[in-house]
Amino acid sequence: MKLIGNENQIVTAINSFPSNYHRDFIIVRDNSRKYTSVPNPGTSITTPLAKDLRDVLKKWGSDQRRAPKPRGVKEFENTLTDPLFHSMLLDVLETKISQIGVLGKNRYVDKQKPGFDRLNFIDSKLIYILNYLAGKLFIDNTNVTYPMKALLLLAAYMPAFDSNVRAGLKRGGFAGFSSTRLVLPKRIGNADSKKITSLPFLLGECWSSYKNIFIKGVSKSNYPNLIDEPARIFDILLFMQSDNTLPVLLEQYSSNNKWYDLQ
């Protein structure tokens, strides 16, 4: 992925993104950062986080027609207080966008190419936790959208594949997002799972390559604190890129239809 937009276009995209979505994200992230910064978060953290997470997911479309209904606040609390879930979330956060990248078709972590077992662990954990969130937080959830929104709010690991982000990726030349829905894969290895597991590495490479432009653009925006949330920045830019009246800011570096087929 390459950044073809300039810092002023980044400012415009961030400032034009709906202010209520900015506000919602900030509300949940204030607590979710605390949640992921301690080994055993207590109820003083998990209880307000459960409520805010559920409220924002509803504002973002869950519980609406054709979307999976969120479970109750108590079930959100039970999920967040589960030590296994907390541990899995920390495993996912070990590979932040700012620490990963791609060279050719090879994925890197901290500038080193990890072995097959390490990459398999990273991919498996991500797909597993999305399925965990789908089952624990929602009723009859089959698509990737809302588990990915929940993960974005809890860990800001990668953008959520909602309809706007998928349209933004498609407009940027990324094949595989023509469908109106993307079914949540149960395991790694197929094309849909690779779209999820490969994108963070491509974003990481893009972030490293154009970091100075991103920093200048975000710093000049109305939300300079986003500089610590690269995944959210990409989420916003891809969302805004779905609007055909706005310029494309992020596009695929090559014309390879199987951009997600990384090693």
Image (spheres, helix red, strand yellow):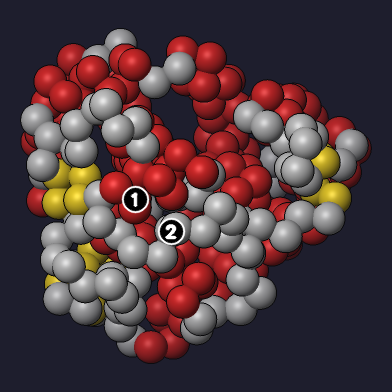
Q: Amino acid at mark 1?
A: Leu
Q: CA distance from mark 1 to mark 2?
A: 7 Å
Q: Nearer the viewer, residue 257 or 95?
A: 257
| Image quadrant containing the C terminus | bottom left
Q: Which residue is mark 2?
A: 177
Assess disc 2: are there few (<14), some (14-19) or many (≥20) residues with their C-alpha within 10 Å of its C-alpha.
many
Residue 257, placed above or below residue 219:
below
Residue 9 in which image quadrant: top left
Marks 1 and 2 close (CB-CB < 8 Å) = yes
Q: Quadrant of residue 95?
A: bottom left
The numbered mark, 1 or 2, whose residue comes first in the sequence reads: 1
Horizontal side of 219 relative to 122 (left or right) equals left
Front residue of 263 and 246 = 246
Residue at image point 55% right, 75% down? 124
Residue for point 56% across, 53% down: 180
Residue 72 relative to residue 20: left or right: right
**Tag shown at residue 169:** 1
Instruction: Please tell me in which quadrant of the rendered image residue 243 appears.
Output: top left
Q: Is 113 located above or below residue 73 in the figure?
A: below
